[in-house]
Amino acid sequence: MLPSSERKICFMASEAEAAQTSKVEMIARYGQVSAKQADVIVALGGDGFMLATLYATQRLGKPVYGMHRGTVGFLMNEFLPDGLYSRLADAENALINPLRMRAVCVDGSKVVALAINEVSLYRAGPQAAKLRISIDGRVRMEELVCDGALVATPAGSTAYNYSAHGPILPIGADVLALTPIAAFRPRRWRGALLPKAAKVRFDVLEPEKRPVSAVADSREASSILSVEIASEPTITHRILFDPGHGLEERLISEQFV
């Protein structure tokens, strides 16, 4: 292992003024190399920028350490200019497998995208969506009338999933949350917990009359006929957190706010 002072760092920042200013300051202190040359990537921004950084660098297999210079900072560490080498040396690892979405649209096009937090479906017109839900090839619900539904990873369970009254999942749990959004029929259906290896399929009923869109984090597929969602075990994101402030602790703390 390299001495902490010899670790090569690539700083990446969002367009926010605070993030850009901090990037200049950190580069002056610790130097800068390309993402390909780096031992670790430091992302300066909010959670949205952290997700963008993970996607942009996933082929490199480099750990990413976030510092909060944005709006929401659930995936970020506190921004402190001093002692970065020591913080990186002591950091805890969180390993995350994303979801892979495969959507088929009304016009015949297909959209394939990854999601670290969740894949969500939502109605794109004035009428409620009607969805058929299948798990591992078996129809489990013939018709869900709702504003939408989502499948969330443990890492994403405190985001949109939690706002939709879905469960918070421990980061080490090999489960996914399937959560409805404003379910009308079955009324107040609360969703389901699924094994991480489960393959979820939504078929849109009456797609012309009741259009539905699907979003994998920030990648959207409009007017879909169906979408298949499954965990992608061949891709692993490595996120670094300060000791005592890792994802496991944050997930627990979020439930006692």
Image (cartoon, rainbow, N blue to C red):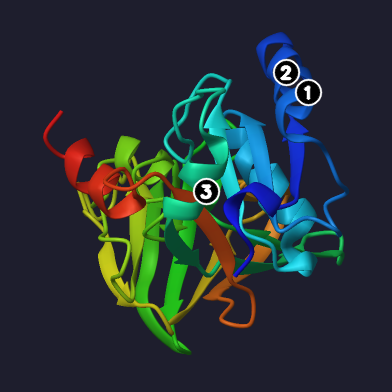
Residue nearest the viewer, comparing 130 with 91:
91
Q: Contact, CB < 8 Å: mark 2 with mark 3? A: no
Residue nearest the viewer, comparing 69 with 1:
1
Q: Is residue 33 above or below residue 112?
A: above
Q: Residues within 10 Å of mark 2 (few under 14, many from 20)?
A: few
Residue 177 circle label? none
Residue 116: x percent and y percent?
Answer: 56, 56
Q: Is residue 129 above or below residue 47?
A: below
Q: Residue at x 43, y 47 (%)?
A: 241
Q: Is residue 77 left or right of residue 169?
A: right
Residue nearest the viewer, comparing 114 with 21:
21
Q: Which residue is mark 3?
A: 88
Residue at mark 3 to residue at mark 1: CA–CA distance: 18 Å
Q: Is residue 226 left or right of residue 187?
A: right
Type of amino acid under label 2: Glu
Type of amino acid under label 1: Ala
Element assignment for label 3: helix
Q: Which residue is mark 2?
A: 25
The answer, for residue 98, to whether it is visible in the render is yes
The tag earlier along the polypeptide, 3 or 1, is 1
Q: Which quadrant does the C terminus fall into?
A: top left
Q: Residue at x 21, y 54 (%)?
A: 190
Q: Contact, CB < 8 Å: mark 1 with mark 2? A: yes
Type of amino acid under label 3: Leu
The answer, for residue 124, to whether it is visible in the render is no
